[in-house]
Amino acid sequence: MSEPVIRVENIGKRYSIGSQLGQPKSISDTVQGYLQSPTRLLQHFRIGPPTELLWAIKDVSFDVYEGEVVGIIGRNGAGKSTLLKVLARITEPTEGQATIRGKVSSLLEVGIGFHPDLTGRENIYLYGVILGMTKVEIDRKFDEIVAFGGVEKFIDTPMKHYSSGMYVRLAFAVAAHVEPDVLLIDEVLAVGDAAFQNKCLGRIDAISKEGRTVLFVSHNIPALLSLCSRAILLSGGTVTADGKTREVLDTYLEGIKEKSELPLFARKDRRGDQRLKFVGFEMRDWQGVEVGSLVSGQDVTLALKYESSDGEPLNNVHVELELYGKFHESLCQLSTNFHQVDFQEIPAAGAIELKIPRLPLQAGRYMFDLYATVSGGMSDYIQDAGALNVEPGDFFGSGRLPPVGHGIFLVQHSWSVASAEDCSQVAYDV
Amino acid sequence: MVAGIPDPSRIQADTSKEVVYIRPTKGWVPLNVKELFLYRELIWMLAWRDILARYKQTIVGVAWAVLQPLVAMIVFTVVFGKLAKIPSDGLRYSVFCLAGTLMWQYFSASAQSSSNCLRNNVHLLTKVHFPRLAIPLACILPPLVDFTAGFLVLMAVMLHYDYYPTWRILSIPLFLGLAMVTALGIGLWLSALTIEYRDIHHVLPFLMQLAMFASPVVYSSSLVPDGLRQFFGLNPMAGVIAGFRWALFGTPVAPGPPMLLLSALMACAILVSGAYYFRRTERSFADFV
């Protein structure tokens, strides 16, 4: 076996959160602190960790060989970005070691360092050098970069006049022409239109064909499936699966499913101050009767049961529910502030009811996240809090079930025919 | 392994490729000047970005560079020259103080911009790898443009008042270099400290104001009492400004070359200690900004 291009050995990264030593502080705070409790001075000499520690990643080990395209998957907060930041040498690991053979380039965000007052041309040079290219190299690839980004006409226009699409295209065009041995990419493809995304995926594919090694963090499961031969699953900061993309993805989706089957009150993996805590949820049909699954096209209610931590009524409550599809892709978000109905005051315990008239979802299983804030502060956030099972139903009221396997949403619509005369009539009327 | 077939691991082991080791570091770390040198283009690019951005935004861009020292000169001449009648080594006060102001404004702009450099480049710190020293280094270059514009004004004013430069003018790069070293040294210390102490950024303009009066900008170092004078060189900018005036007008560098030497030593000490402190703190930049 040849030597790995990337060798990661027991890498761990610890952050101290909320501790006095970890937070940036001001001189006045510090002086005040010393005056109030002189023993705090000793803290600077204290050996040992400050109070609140969080291992973003721990004991992560794997090898990557030349030409491999490896997808890194996991839920938000699983440590994917931290891992990439450590490998990109943006932040140091707390323990462990990694060895990378060859030139590393990282694309953690497109367009960093772009300056709005500079022209596209000037920014290509600036960004290129930031990404590790030399000026000579950029000179040589300049036309290619401009053509890839499709911004020929605006190349001498200040970037502040660019649309966000042009901005992203130019940024990726530069990044795509860096020629590192190892490329680290973090979710940058979530931007741009579909055509451009495909172009980017094609470019990543080409990069790997040239024998370069790519590490790729993404939530875009179809993209991972088509690009990566191998995937690594991170959960809670450790590697929980490593192997063929298809198999690792199955493990990932299965894990999400299992978790969502736990009753809400028993869930420990939640964030926020818990002033409002979701303790259960119920699906109800159009008659208000609790049901195990919903039916397409029926009026349905989701009751989100909650409790307040101190038994007091809660003020200014905002709730969101985000729905996910088969590949755990986000489908839509339902939020109290879309209708400006954040609740001014709600009792200490009860249920927040969400009504969806004529449920416009195809039959299937849909995971959802729950999120609540109280008076602006995050109170409870549970990823994959539960699942909605949807059974086929007569959405269109036609006495027939809509065929499955065609999309996710059902949309109310109508068809009609106008004769040629009507058409010309209309045209003349206008 | 069959003879004649090359060992695949040998083919793969490409010795020309650099190997990056990523592991935790502790305490003082080497400056790694070699890597910084490899990234010299980035330093130029960052400086060039700031210059372009600054002069593109305003039509008065360059005019501003000329106006600033001129306005300061007029104000100082009225207050310190005419009202307080501060002696100026036998020179016309306006010319005397324009020279001091020009050098001071370069130093002050560079030191402030490099002190705030990390706050102003958070997106770079958290998203891409490069030697962090490149950022403060790039910050001391753009103010050179203002300095050059101001220098031309100074030359015009000098000729107007019949002060003609001599061969000594060739030593100006030396004093400017010393000002750059000092500004960078201060910038390294303060930028690394701002990571832990946010309010340095608020105190900085005030500190600069105080430091100006501790340097011979509006007065001559020959006014400093004898007993204190040898310590005056501890302020690197004292040596820089006295030396700059010597280069322009041939005024004596009071109290002579030892003060210059002391200033130069101090400037280097600040730079080297600043660079090491910066490198020591560097590992936490991305986590705390």
Image (tube, rainbow, N blue to C red):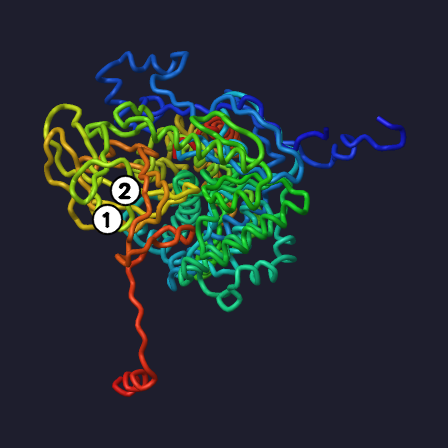
Answer yes or no: are tags 2 and 1 on the same subunit: yes
Task: Say the numbered circle drawn on residue A298.
Answer: 1
Res B258 seen here:
no
* Residue B63 in the figure: left or right of residue B129: left
Q: Quadrant of the N terminus of chain A?
A: top right
Q: Quadrant of the C terminus of chain A?
A: bottom left
Disc 2 chain ID = A
SS at mark 2?
strand
Q: Position of residue A43 (x, y in %)?
A: 34, 14
- For label 2, the crowd category at 10 Å Cα-Cα, with few meaning under 14, some 14 to 19 and many 20 or more, is many
On screen, residue B16 above or below A130? above
Q: Amino acid at mark 2?
A: Leu
Where residue B85 sits: x, y (%)?
29, 46
- Residue carrying label 2: A294
Q: Label 1 near label 2: C-beta < 8 Å?
A: yes
Q: Observer-nearest residue: B211 or B121?
A: B121
Q: Is residue A86 visible?
A: yes
In the image, residue A221 above or below residue A406 = above
Give residue B232's quadrant in the image. top left
In depth, the one of B274 and A409 nearer the eye is: A409
Q: Which mark is residue A371?
A: none
Amino acid under disc 1: Gln
Label 1 CA crowd tier, 10 Å (few <14, some 14–19, many 20+): some
